Amino acid sequence: MDTTQLGYLAALLTTGSLLPQVLHTLRTRDTHSISLSMYLMLVCGTGTWLLYGLSIAALPVVLANALSMLLSSVILVMKLREVLRTRTAKSAP
């Protein structure tokens, strides 16, 4: 296995690890136990890795982090909606 194949395998495994959480969250619509700060950091981190991959023209890094950022952004948006709903409900008279 060459280094590019190793990169694609690593990309598949790490990006694929997000899929069960995304599917579960989409199915249940429950984000109560999900950490907002963790997903903020994950989206920012994968965005930074994406920029790095683009700057060194490393396709496995680009693909993995673009997809990881997309998947983690789905959860982040759902979590942010839940936080806003909760804050709005608490501030309502």
Image (cartoon, rainbow, N blue to C red):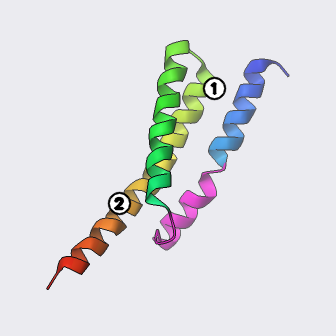
In what quadrant of the picture does the C terminus appear?
bottom left
Quarter of the image where one finds residue 80: bottom left
Q: Amino acid at mark 1?
A: Pro
The part of the chain drawn in magenta is 17-34
- For disc 1, the marked residue is 60
Report whether residue 50 is seen. Answer: yes
Placement of 75 over or under 91, stated as above or below: above
Q: Amino acid at mark 2?
A: Leu
Query: Percent from the top left, x then y, of residue 55?
Result: 49, 15
Query: Percent from the top left, x then y, of residue 42?
Result: 51, 45
Label disc, if present, on residue 80 of the rendered structure = 2
Query: Percent from the top left, x then y, of residue 13?
Result: 71, 42
Which residue in the rendered view is the most extreme toward the right? 1
Going from the N terminus, do you reach mark 2 or mark 1 first?
1
Q: Please state which of the two labelled residues, at mark 2 or mark 1, is closer to the viewer.
A: 2
Residue at the spot 44% in from the left edge and 39% down from the top edge? 44
Classify residue 10 as left or right of residue 65.
right
Label disc, if present, on residue 52 of the rendered structure = none
Residue at the spot 65% in from the left edge and 47% down from the top edge? 16
Query: Percent from the top left, x then y, of residue 49?
Result: 53, 29
Residue nearer the viewer, 13 or 32: 32
